[in-house]
Amino acid sequence: MEILRSQVLTDTHNTDALKGGEEQQRLSVLPVWRDTPLFTDRERAALELTEAMVWLADIPCPTRFSPARPPSSARSNSPS
């Protein structure tokens, strides 16, 4: 998992998390969160969602979309 891709951001967020009461052990194992029992089900859901959004952001999106068309069966049954 590579959500934060900047050393500066990682350091800043780790420092903020520690100041906010987060445990160093949990921060250390964050890259392998699936393999540790240190996160609750709710935290795991948030991590899964965050990862999915990051991966979706990396997928190219077309700049032009085709207009929606009804299925061919609906077109053939419509009156001319």
Image (spheres, helix red, strand yellow):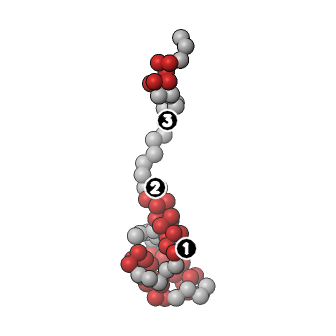
Element carrying mark 2: helix
The outermost residue toward the top is 80
Foreground: 31 or 14? 31
Q: Disc 1 or 3, which lies upstream in sequence?
A: 1
Q: Is residue 72 above or below residue 17?
A: above
Observer able to see residue 11: no
Residue found 58% across the figure and 82% down from its top: 16
Q: Residues within 10 Å of mark 2 (few under 14, many from 20)?
A: few
Q: Residues within 10 Å of mark 3 (few under 14, many from 20)?
A: few
Foreground: 75 or 48? 75
Which amino acid, by three-letter code, is at mark 1?
Answer: Arg
Q: Which residue is mark 2?
A: 56
Observer able to see residue 43: yes
Q: Is residue 68 above or below residue 24?
A: above
Q: Disc 1 or 2, which lies upstream in sequence?
A: 1
Please name which of the two marks, 1 or 2, marks the residue nearer to the observer: 1
Residue found 48% across the figure and 40% down from its top: 63
Q: Disc 2 or 3, which lies upstream in sequence?
A: 2
Tell me the tag on residue 76: none
Q: Which residue is mark 1?
A: 42
Q: Which residue is mark 3?
A: 65
Foreground: 69 or 77? 77
Residue 75 on image: x %, y %: 49, 21
Residue 3: quadrant of the picture: bottom left
Distance from the alpha carbon under mark 2 to that under mark 3: 18 Å
Element carrying mark 3: loop
Residue 2 on image: x %, y %: 41, 69
Distance from the alpha carbon under mark 1 to that under mark 3: 36 Å
Residue 77 on image: x %, y %: 50, 18
